[in-house]
Image (cartoon, grey):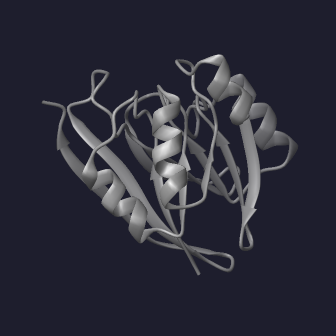
Amino acid sequence: MTKILLLSDSHSYMDDRILDYAKQADEIWHCGDFGSFEIIEQLEKIKPLKGVWGNIDNAKIRSEFPEVNRFFCEKVEVLMIHIGGYPGKYTPLAKKEISEKAPKLFISGHSHILKAMYDDKNKLLHLNPGACGKQGWHKMRTMMQFVIDGEEIKDLAVIELGTKV
């Protein structure tokens, strides 16, 4: 059983609430737009970190993280792309990756819109944790936590971190 903290779009912002949730997880997954390398260093000190770079991330971050990250957590294949869209509105890169081999879990960020929806056509769960940072048009800062237990994705919870102000 692996407890995951899923975040995206921190845009160089980190606070104690995010770090407290990170300490409770087994792994931290960040879906891009870290904003600064300091965010990566803070998270890596706490738990193992997986992620992808986002459109605002610099060359140093892009050298540490891929644009597309495909991996297994237990028996669940995961595909992570910062700008990936969502079921029925995937980006060309996401469409290509999903059509080559659909994962069980597809994660994207970028939109700052929290979404959890099942894609019936591709038989996958899509998650977008929204944005945990303070930059962007979103009003509520959000992230997600869930558990992967063998082939099962369960106990999904949305964490509201408060408004940006």
Question: Is residue 96 at least partly visible in the picture?
Answer: yes
Q: Nearer the viewer, residue 128 or 46?
A: 46
- On the image, the x and y values in percent for residue 92 come to 72, 24
Count up the numbered dots: 0
Find residue 64 and report its image quarter.
top right
- Tell whether 27 sits left or right of 115: right
The quadrant of the rendering that contains the C terminus is: top left
- On the image, the x and y values in percent for residue 14 come to 33, 40
The quadrant of the rendering that contains the N terminus is: bottom right
- Tell whether 62 sits left or right of 48: right
- In this view, the residue farthest toward the right is 100
- Tell whether 85 sits left or right of 151: left
- On the image, the x and y values in percent for residue 74 come to 71, 73
- On the image, the x and y values in percent for residue 137 come to 27, 21
Question: Is residue 67 at least partly visible in the picture?
Answer: no
Q: State the residue at coordinates (48%, 27%).
A: 36
- Tell whether 133 sits left or right of 55: left
Q: State the residue at coordinates (47%, 34%).
A: 38
- In this view, the residue farthest toward the left is 165
Q: Nearer the viewer, residue 51 or 38?
A: 38
In the image, is residue 94 above or below residue 44?
above
Q: State the residue at coordinates (58%, 40%).
A: 87
Q: Nearer the viewer, residue 43 or 163?
A: 43
Find residue 134 and report its image quarter.
top left
Q: State the residue at coordinates (76%, 48%).
A: 70
